[in-house]
Image (cartoon, rainbow, N blue to C red):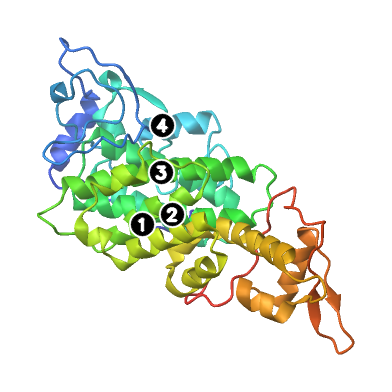
Amino acid sequence: MERTRRPRPRQPPNLSSSSLSSTHSRSQKFTTNPTKSVKSLDTDLDAPDRFKAGRGAQAEGDVDDSHSLPTLVGTCPLMCPEGERAQRERLRDLAVFERLNGNPRKTSPGLAVKKFCRTISIRDVQLSDVRPLPVLEDTLDYLLSLLDSTEYSFEVVHDFIFDRTRSIRQDLSMQNIINKKAIYMYEKMVQFHVTSCHKLQSCRDPNISSVHYLNMEQLTKALASLFNLYDANRNYDSTYEHEAEFRSFYVLLHLGPNSQPMGESLSLWFRHVPIPIINSKEMCFARKILRFFRMGNYIRFLSITASEASHLQYCIIEPYVSEVRGLALSCINNGGYKLHPYPLAHLSKLLMMKESDLISFCNACGLETCIDEVGNKFLPTKQTTFCCPKGGFQSYGFTGLEFER
């Protein structure tokens, strides 16, 4: 039986039914001024300068003269154009979520979702293959509803949503959609990539590191476009409800080895951030976390993370929590007195982790623990066997967080 889903996406409000039918019958193409030279578009670029206040957004990619491009309004009423759906049925190119009754050669308009196409020539784009904003909104809601699926592993779910949201961004960009609805859609897609950072940590796939890398890559691209959308829709000093939190993600991304995840230094980036955002609690938190991480102040890093991080902020910070714990363990091991072992009960509170997890963490770092005659557990200091785990630090629970993980 076909999966149940929301009713078929509504038609775009600015197109009548008659114009839609006539457009499909003619297979109208979106063409540019023939006197202008237009390059092939890689419409996944999400370039940081796509949207600028005071001017429209050009389609993602390189165009000789963006002013020569007419406005494109898609007419596809479905999540996947009919032509693509038929072709993918013939090629058996259907994801598990798109197969009708599990048949790899059969799908339906309620299951098939348009795939991402890396390179598109803007001369050859058909209006009937591009989804208008209302259809894109419904498609995104449908995709995100699959995150609750228990039938498949998260790796499978992520792979499907990852590709299809790129296609949504592609259609938004080609149609130069930069309104408030586009902002809300980009926020949802950024949230998907951020939560994926957390969920991918627990996956057992041996190739998960490459998946995590690609997820982070798309996170930075979607963030860059979202920030420019904020700026393009700015009225005086007004800010959007969730803008401060989403802006803070950019600062937290500097915890990683890439000091300029979007190609711009943090000091230069802050010059373009509105003052209300700079002074927001979300941004102040992110700046403190970055400062304490670079200083190696593990006590303040862990305590502030536990007391102030939102769930989405913690999803970005989580991979670095174990790194900070390893630093703390190294400092305590090397700086302690050899005749005075460090109590694990106190160390577990300091590192904000369960005592049983702490023992496993110590062993993974090459350190042994001991128990006295009354059952108290200790970490003998000055051990020369400390080392970082070869496979990287394992993620352990974090006690004291103010939200449910």
Camera-near label (4 vs 2) is 2
State which tag comes first along the sequence, 1 or 4: 4
State which tag comes first along the sequence, 3 or 4: 4
Instruction: Tell me the SS state at disc 2.
Output: helix
State which tag comes first along the sequence, 2 or 3: 3
Q: Position of residue 321 (x, y in %)?
A: 58, 61
Per the model, the C-alpha gap separating discs 3 and 4 is 29 Å
Determine whether, in the image, residue 286 is placed left or right of residue 199.
left
Camera-near label (2 vs 3) is 2
Camera-near label (3 vs 4) is 3
Looking at the rendered structure, the kind of residue marked 4 is Glu
Q: Residue furthest top?
A: 35
Residue 79 appears in view: no
Determine whether, in the image, residue 369 is placed left or right of residue 157.
right
Q: Residue furthest right?
A: 373
Task: Give the residue at mark 4.
Answer: 84
Looking at the rendered structure, the kind of residue marked 1 is Ser
Residue 383: image tag: none
Q: Position of residue 302 (x, y in %)?
A: 54, 68
Residue 220: image tag: 3
Q: Residues within 10 Å of mark 2 (few under 14, many from 20)?
A: many
Query: Residue at coordinates 53% horizontally, 34% vertically from top-left?
Result: 93
Q: Residues within 10 Å of mark 3 (few under 14, many from 20)?
A: many
Residue 248: image tag: 1
Query: Residue at coordinates 64% horizontally, 73% vertically from top-left?
Result: 353
Q: Position of residue 257 (x, y in %)?
A: 53, 43
Task: Give the residue at mark 2.
Answer: 252
Callout 1–callout 3 Cβ contact below 8 Å = no
Looking at the rendered structure, the kind of residue marked 3 is Thr
Callout 2–callout 1 Cβ contact below 8 Å = yes
